[in-house]
Amino acid sequence: MKEKMKRLERELKRLEALQADGIDVSEAIDKRKLELKALKVDFPMDAWDRVIKARDAKRPVASQYIESLVEGFMEFHGDRRFGDDPALIGGVGWIGDTAFTILGQEKGVGTKERVKRNFGMLNPEGYRKAQRLMKQAEKFQRPILCLVDTPGAFCGLGAEERGQGQAIAESLTIMAGLEVPVITIVIGEGGSGGALAMSVSDEVWMMENSIYSILSPEGFASILWKDSSKAQEASEVMKITAQDLESFGMVDRVVKEPEEFSIETLPSVIESIREMIVETAAAYQALPVEALLKKRYEKFRAMGKVSEKEGME
Amino acid sequence: MLFKKRTYATIQLPKTKEPFVQTEADPISRGEVIPEGDFHKCPNCGEIFYAEILKTTEGVCQKCGQHLRLGARERIAQITDVFDEFHMRMEETNPLDFPGYEKKLASYRERSQEEEGVITGVAEIAEQRCILAVMDAGFMMGSMGSVVGEKITLAVERAKAEDLPLIIFCASGGARMQEGIYSLMQMAKISLAIEAFSKAGGLYISVLTDPTTGGVTASFAMQGDLIVAEPGTLIGFAGRRVIEQTIRQILPEGFQRAEFLLEKGFVDRIVPRNEMKETLSGILRLHGGIR
């Protein structure tokens, strides 16, 4: 059905070009538009397909990226304040010949592991562990790679008691001032403030079928339309795909995925980005610190920029 | 260049307490703001007052001490002696072409007679000059969209450029859903500005007022050098309902209130409304080196 939709869209484009050239094909255009509309009702929404892919249980998770991408990875634990959050993997290892600090939001594989990892939903101690390792990376002049894959920061009693909001706020502050390059790759779900807390970066990349949003489509539908079952519709209006974000200038690169993206096909993807990660980090590391910070500032400064209306009342 | 352009009007606010009256429809019916009219019921204890009496108490219930929600203008009148507003008229945005958003914005503008959910300007508080941003919970739940984010960022940048202290009164239900990812990015944008201001040695006082939640809590509300809160203020990251659904438990009394956050170490001081001006001017003097 998707194929048919694509074919119709292609034909429509061609016909519209003809129409623009002054040849009357409006009947044929209308016919195809109607057909497409009917199909879209029955088989809607590209965005929703991507939501499903982004959440697919077979999709590679952060620990598998690290395994395949990083040599000699050493994991380090704990936030030195409260505990160690299993939803955040942090450590140091080699990508090519460069030592990177790597931080990955980990969803886990298999039910038992997923529960242990809290489905990739970090508690405040997860963000504070990330902060500690980021500051350490800065001290030792290492670039940082963040892998984002979270439905959102965990919403629980303990999380609130230990200052979930403050923890995320602090992560934003620290990333704003980091004097080493930071690259973020959204590998699955980039859920809200919980994702942003690892994405105030010099470059933000997204995997082709990952999403990045203010809230889950379910949550969005529930807040705006009081109906969480309208998630599919929400995913479309929210503009959350890698392609949407690239068009907004919020994402620097979209990484192509194979048709079936799983642990089996992951190595080919890793090979396609390894060099790019090293080279990008090196390019930013070559900048003087003031220039690096200024560039990061200006990158986010331009997002949602609004100008003043002409004249005064 | 924006800093140089004097595109704001000067409002000389009276030294005496202005009566603060908010005429918005639903927040009143929800008992959240002080209504125009004869009587008002406290949303906390149910006590019924003459509205005139409430006005003389700065919107605080005299029976139970509940601090009722205030509009931004009333707040500014209470704590400043002089206030020069800037960036009064920003272009409206609908970055996602979200259906019905413009109409919704227009209706809030009509009702509140305000352009957006935050007012920013240069203020004098007991002879101390500072940059002041005051959010308004009555404007679309005080949600943060691009205009709110831009106005706050410009305020922070101005504080840095003019070497003035910064005070932000937070009041927000969180993200502006209709602006999606653009709303989220305002958190990053403002955080970068605050970090640059902080590195330059600027003082930032964050004042948390009811309610301070979601993305605002997870960014500039919690980034103050000093964080003060009004009594009883709701302060949290996730909403009560979401947490209860997640943990399948009813949350305890007083959870996410200012007093709870003070106990947990996330707030410096709780300051009642009638002491707010004095407290802020005291902090400003301590950091300005003038007794």
Image (spheres, coloured by chain):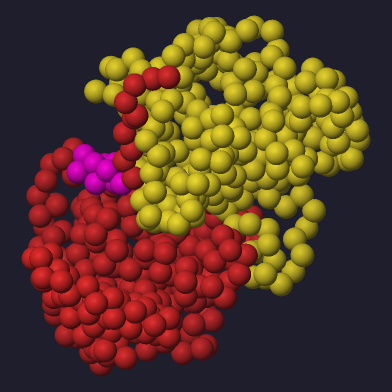
Residue A19 position (above or below residue B273): below
Residue B210 position (above or below residue A311): below
For the N terminus of chain A, the quadrant is bottom left
Residue B209 position (above or below residue A42): above
Asked whether A127 or A208 is in front, the reply is A208
Q: Is residue A298 magenta?
A: yes
User: Does residue A109 show up?
Assistant: no
Q: Chain B in the picture: what colour?
A: yellow
Q: Chain A in the picture: what colour?
A: red
Residue B165 position (above or below residue B90): above
> Which quarter of the picture shows residue A257?
bottom left
Horizontal side of residue A31 vs B48, given as left or right: left
Secondary structure mostly seen in the magenta stretch: helix
Q: Is residue B106 magenta?
A: no
Range covered by the magenta-colored residues: A294-303
Residue for point 89% across, 40% down: B46
Horizontal side of residue A30 vs B216, given as left or right: left
Horizontal side of residue A266 vs B46, given as left or right: left
